[in-house]
Amino acid sequence: MESVGISVDSPQKRVMDTVFQGANELSLDAKGRLAVPTKLRDGLLSSPDRKLVLTAHPDRCLLLYPAHAWAPKRDQVMAWASFDPQQALWRRLLIGHAEELELDSAGRFLIPPALRKYAGIDRQVMMIGQGAYFEIWNLSAWEAQISQMDAGPRGLPPGLENFSL
């Protein structure tokens, strides 16, 4: 897994163009801390305040954002109608579980117990780059996600018929 910085003119533009990609299997320590691989730290700490945000995803994984990348998403979610039951449910999940974090001197962050419980994370995790953020999965849940590709249809989702690799 790597953080790829795209060459640009200014440091501020460079921060916005960090792309997270790849997958790493990692282990939590006994206190529930996850050590971020060294090669990913600069990209994750690209926010001016060097903060991270960790929140829940409806697929029972966690999302890890640099704070500057999370801010516009948070603002979008906060604009959702609180009286619409479906929007309120998603808002509770995404905003209600959001935790601001910092890496310690060893490059680790604590996954709060409520988020570990939500995602079923105990020891082994997969950290999967998704462009502007990472997904953090319980290892067996990640393997189940991957096995769905083997069990299901091999075609592309609707709207991607002209996509090729």
Image (cartoon, rainbow, N blue to C red):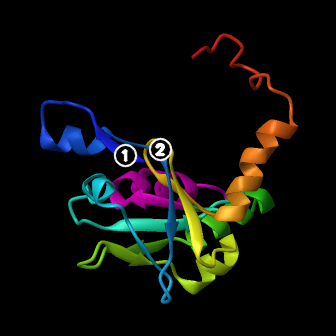
Label 1 sits on residue: 2
Structural crowding at the residue carrying mark 1, measured as other residues with C-alpha within 10 Å and reported as few (<14), some (14–19) or many (≥20): some
Q: Tell me where residue 89 appears, x and y as whole percent.
A: 73, 65
User: Going by the image, does 124 lie left or right of 22?
Assistant: right
* Residue farthest along the top direction in this orientation: 162
Q: Tell me where residue 11 appears, x and y as whole percent.
A: 14, 43
Q: Give the residue displayed 43% in from the left and 56% down from the top.
A: 70
Whether residue 124 is situated above or below residue 156 in the rendered picture: below
The answer to which image quadrant residue 60 occupies is: bottom right
Whether residue 81 is situated above or below residue 51 in the rendered picture: above
Q: What element carries label 2?
A: loop
Whether residue 2 is situated above or below residue 127 in the rendered picture: above
Q: Which segment is the magenta one?
A: 63-82
Q: What residue type is labelled 2?
A: Gly
The answer to which image quadrant residue 155 occupies is: top right
**Is 135 colored magenta in this rendering?**
no
Front-most of residues 84 and 37: 37
Task: Tell me whether the residue at label 1 lies in contact with that at label 2, contact meaning CB atoms closer than 8 angstroms.
Answer: yes
Q: What element carries label 1?
A: strand
The mark found on residue 22 in the picture is 2
